[in-house]
Amino acid sequence: MKFDLAYCLSLDDKLSIYDVRDLNFDETVAFDSAKEHFQCPNDACRSTFEASNELGTFNAKNVNYVRTPHFKNLPTTQHVAGCPYVSLKASVSGVETADGEVDDGREEHFPSELLLTRREYVRKPVTPAGAADMLRDDPVRVAADSGKESVGRESAPDKTSVFAHPVECFVSNFADKELLKRMPLKVGEHSAPYSSFFKKIEYLTDNKGLIYWGRIKKIEDFHSASFRIDFEDKVWFKKTDDSKKKPYPVSVYLNKKLIDNYRKRKAFLEEIKHAVDSDKALFCFFYGVTPELKQVPGKKNPEKPFEVFNANIENLDHFIIREAPGLE
């Protein structure tokens, strides 16, 4: 059992660890989880203790991670009897154990929907001098952008706007095929079990609008200004004028403008540069575009194009490169 949420004192709201990670890397928001105060998400439990009764975080600030991020009890954390989080004990390794059992590291809290409108935060105006006592100076509140859907305490953890959350559910539970078949996921107008929504890259022609993933063969770094990711697996496809299916390579492209304008640009460049230099097996997950068969000019002979299933990534919020040992 893991903490699916924690109450953030300065935001006066409950966040998932993926919300916290998103805020840590967002260059448009002043947020540092190491300086924030997180408490038990159980309202009755939290109100019983002083504000100093806090939770910790695990993998909240690591750009690259393998073990599942989560909130954790600290040695000094207290809970009331009957609190669903009272059985979680902090181990020396930092991984919680319940009643002495070793945590298997899986993400257990599956969001049922990935919202395509990002959760936004605005800072509340400073309280005038002499006003009534406040919980904290200059608190931050969650606010919905006018006319847009916002993820708040009523929806979490059933809904999320952070792509890494459903990806972690899929990756960390990959061996449990039956579980992935049972758990539902909705993105936009499309609904399917996790097992069907995550589509291996070689089967991308089966259905559009899914989360595609595959093992990376090579990352082409064009002077850290743009990147091309080539996948190991190929798509077997039969064109109308062909007698049988043929294998075609698959790649996605990330252009300079997309990267330069990204709100988490520094974290993204750290992530992908680490991937370029890594000798470990890496996997790419993305949503929002479906690679299609295109003719691309050859490097040695531009006049002789070759055919490849290719797409330009349009939103880096829905793109991840990561280690995933369980998928090998």
Image: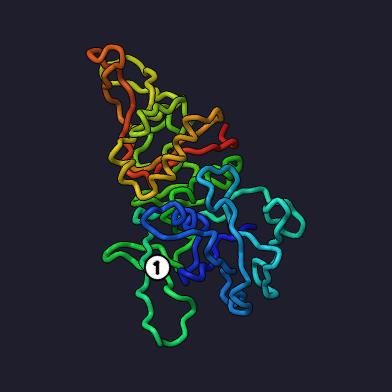
Q: Nearer the viewer, residue 156 or 194?
A: 156
Left or right: 82 in relation to 156: right
- Answer whether residue 181 is visible to the viewer in this image: no
Q: Amino acid at mark 1?
A: Val
Q: Residue at x 54, y 30 (%)?
A: 281
Q: Residue at x 50, y 38 (%)?
A: 322
Identify the element where label 1 is drawn: strand
List the residue tagged with mark 1. Answer: 142
Q: Position of residue 271 (x, y in %)?
A: 46, 40
Q: Position of residue 78 (x, y in %)?
A: 68, 71
Count up the numbered dots: 1
Q: Position of residue 60 (x, y in %)?
A: 54, 53
> Residue 311: which quarter of the image?
top left
Q: Residue at x 56, y 66 (%)?
A: 38
Q: Position of residue 51 (x, y in %)?
A: 59, 75
- Above or below: residue 233 compared with residue 176: above
- Above or below: residue 168 compared with residue 300: below
- Above or below: residue 312 compared with residue 297: below
- Answer whether residue 254 is visible to the viewer in this image: yes
**Which quadrant of the rendered structure holds the N terminus?**
bottom right
Left or right: 50 in relation to 293: right
